[in-house]
Amino acid sequence: MGTTWLPRSSLSWLGHPAPRPRCPRGGRRRTSRLSRGLRVGVLAAVVAVVAAACTDSPTPSNAAKGTTTHDSVLVMASSGPWTTWGYNPWSTNLNFPSGANGFVFLPLAIQNWPSLDSFTPQLAQNWSVHGNQLQINLQPKATWQDGTPVTSKDVVDTLYLDALTQAGIWNDITDVAAKGTKSVVLTARPGVPMVLVENDLFNGVTPYPSSVWGKYVTPELKQAVDSYFTQARTDPAAAAEGPAYKTMTTALQNLAKVHPKTLVGDGPYKLVGMTTQEQKLTKWDGFYAADKISVKEIRYLGNQQPQVNSNLLSGTADFSSGWLYMPSAIVNQWQQNPDAHLLSVPGTFQGQIVFNNAKPPFNSVKVRQAMAYALPRQKMDELAWGKTKPHAVTPSIPEGLVDQVAQEFLTKEQLASLNPYPYDTKKAAALLQEAGFRRTGGKWFMPDGKPFKVTLEMNSGWTDQIAAFKVADSALDSFGIDSTLNTVEGVSYSEDLHTGNFQIGAFCCTGGSPNPLLDFEQSPMGSANNFTATGSSAGRRGLGYGPKVNVPGLGVVNVPQELDKQIHQVASGPRMKELTWSWAQLVNQQVPYLEYADFANQIAFSTKKFNWPAESSPLWRQHSNGNYLIVVGQEKGEISPK
């Protein structure tokens, strides 16, 4: 038996649904052991996606007091689930303030998308690699907002508490230790490239003060973490039943019950007031780079998406980002204002059409290819997300990657050799006929003589994607395939996909990682969704693709297991490009699933009160998280009051 790896990602069938203007039914991502660092990053990144305070009233003790119209006050039209909130980043029941990450708390560094190995330093001044060790040197003047210095102990303690939520970094390291008061050393596991350690560290870990959280990091907890992750590398099922895991579970349950009354941050802003409708942040002069921060106050307006759009149109708000969903009619109104600007930066994540690969007729490659030609993906996207500055566009080539990442790792010649699958019912018909289907009286019949009927299944809460699938439903009917569109409540929908109880469904959302192998691993054919080996869905076949398939350049491999192995062993470089080409060919040729939408980050901003980066600035594309964009933009001198 080969090495068994823990999944690098916590995304699943339910995870990461596309933004839509409605009150949330619950969390956006899967409710399993999701990394606390990732939860916080996601919450900040979706500042204009998930509807916020729907019914709750403000909490008087923390209410934002007063407003101002001074030009140095930046108003962000945002939305976040603030109906229940608290100041515990590890809580599974209370939402951490959306304005905290990046504004109040600094990450160690920020990834410059779509590069895999380029980062903008934040709390980490610099870092260096020494053999199998990564040394992080903290900003020497970094201070917590209670006046105490930020130290290596803060980072070490945070990492151990993150282990309780299965943070990805613990798949990569065997040890983390302080080296003096301002340096931290992480030791990589054998065979894990350092760039992958950097990615999991910088993308998944935001340090918190030991003065608040350090007492929960006991010697017993550290021993349990080390023991659990060591065992989980070779036998994750046994590790999940062992005493170390039980110790960690109990520790997380106790940790989640802690309710701090204030936020002790280390970032450029302090949270001075919060209600279910608004967060108020003011510049903190103790920030080590306070001289670069020119926006003195930020008001974070929490609204449902229609109100976000209204705030922008009325001039109340100066900025909104984070996968903003602005329908075409609102786009047209917004652009009539001479100070209004809207960028659509594609590549945030994907929407995918999934076929039940285990049951006829979709166990046939030719049938799946025929469906790729028969589904009018561009029309689906344009109806659901518009043509002008859209929230989603059709991928140029359905090979499993968003276009920007594909262009980083595949050559022009390789991309040109792949099939773009344009809408073409003649080619679809020819493929069905090759597969033994026949058309009589305008209707298609399967090789066994039965009518070709399909059911399209969609999560009932994904209203924008339902609109897209209505186009697909109509197109298939017109083509002669008897099609029915069913909408299913979210939990039941996830269950259907995991158990393979579907014909054609929608998968949302993965993709957009600067690591293309991670995109393939998180895709419908990866281990979280296809012949799942661990977790609550262990033993379920999900997509039912393979699992053993002849992959170009690799031969016959177990697809989910091979992807799990590769994402822990392969760094950027020639080998990653070779493997990216192998998996891209597989997805394009065998169509185990079909990309139909690359979602964009819509960024709305007004130049009435503020100077913003030129539309050609890489800042807009590097940081889909609006908080990071505003902080880094100020640090680089590209965002300032007029």
Image (cartoon, grey):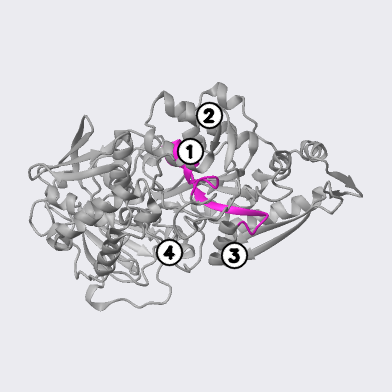
Question: Eyeballing the image, is 346 above or below 320?
Answer: above
Which structural element holds mark 4?
loop
State the mark number for residue 460: 3
- Residue at screen point 8% across, 51% down: 149
User: Residue 585: within the magenta?
Assistant: no
Nearer the observer: mark 1 or 4; the answer is 1
Circle 2: residue type: Leu
Which structural element holds mark 3?
loop
Asked whether, in this view, residue 134 is left or right of residue 362, the answer is: left
User: Residue 508: within the magenta?
Assistant: yes
* Mark 1 in CB contact with mark 2 (< 8 angstroms): yes
* Mark 3 in CB contact with mark 2 (< 8 angstroms): no
* Mark 2 in CB contact with mark 4 (< 8 angstroms): no
Q: How many marks?
A: 4
Q: Which residue is labeled 1 in the image?
A: 562
Q: Which residue is labeled 2 in the image?
A: 554
Front residue (pair 56, 636):
56
Point out the stretch of residues depicted in magenta: 500-527
Query: Nearer the N terminus, badge 2 or badge 4?
Result: 4
Badge 2: residue crowd in 10 Å (few <14, some 14–19, many ≥20): few
Front residue (pair 322, 310):
322
Asked whether, in this view, residue 197 is left or right of residue 223, the answer is: right
- Residue at screen point 48% across, 38% down: 562
Circle 3: residue type: Ser
Which structural element holds mark 1?
helix
Front residue (pair 538, 158):
538
**Marks 1 and 3, Cα distance to the nearest angstrom?**
33 Å
Which structural element holds mark 2?
loop
- Residue at screen point 11% across, 49% down: 151
